[in-house]
Amino acid sequence: MEDTFSNLATYGYIGLFLYSLGGGFIGLVAAGVLSFMGKMDLTLSISIAFLGNALGDVLLFWLTRYQKSMMVEGLRKHRRKLALAHILIKKHGDWVIFIQKFIYGLKTVVPIAIALTKYDFKKFAVLNVFAAAVWALAFGLSSYYFGAVLSKFALYINDNKWIAPVILLTIGGAVWIYLEKATKKK
């Protein structure tokens, strides 16, 4: 387990940035715990996760808006999720940009759905940067302050390896069921 922490501290900032381009929740929590343990710097971790997360959504928006032909093939499989994102945007407006950072499973779909509308790119970028900052601070600081509990939990999972797949399947299944239910044809 100590080797894992050492490798994460060595390559953690690069991995955190790359992982944050597509979401970064688990990476940021891990960085917060490693910061608590003294293996990483908390301020640098939060800053890197913020930059990666903000940049990732702006790139998704830009690619969808201005490189639509490249994105069309991948979008066909997610028509219902995109429809759900459109409904959420109409219902909740600009708040969806903020809220999507905190809902696992919608993080990549919402910027794509917004880009397919006539939503202003500059307005999206400003709201996205604000939302990414709040997201990075909320999860980075909370994982740092709960570092003792989270590190004990990680050691417990390391000793009982069967728990990790159960947790992942439960969370993944809950997200899948929610998305299936929310996008079901009526």
Image: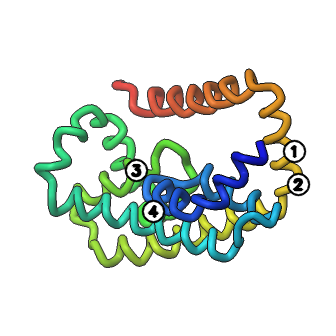
Q: Residues within 10 Å of mark 2 (few under 14, many from 20)?
A: some
The residue identified by callout 2 is 148
Ranked by sequence position, the earlier of labels 3 and 4 is 4
Horizontal side of residue 141 vs 151, given as left or right = left
Q: Are marks 2 and 1 in contact (CB under 8 Å)?
A: yes
The residue identified by callout 4 is 97
The kind of residue on which mark 2 rests is Ala
Q: Which mark is residue 109?
A: none
Ranked by sequence position, the earlier of labels 1 and 3 is 3
Say which of 138 and 123 sits in front: 138
Residue 11 sits above or below residue 79 on the image:
below
Real-space Cα separation, disc 2 to disc 1, in angstroms: 6 Å
Ranked by sequence position, the earlier of labels 4 and 2 is 4
Residue 146 sits above or below residue 104 on the image:
below
Real-space Cα separation, disc 4 to disc 2, in angstroms: 32 Å
What x and y, as percent, mark residue 184?
Answer: 39, 26
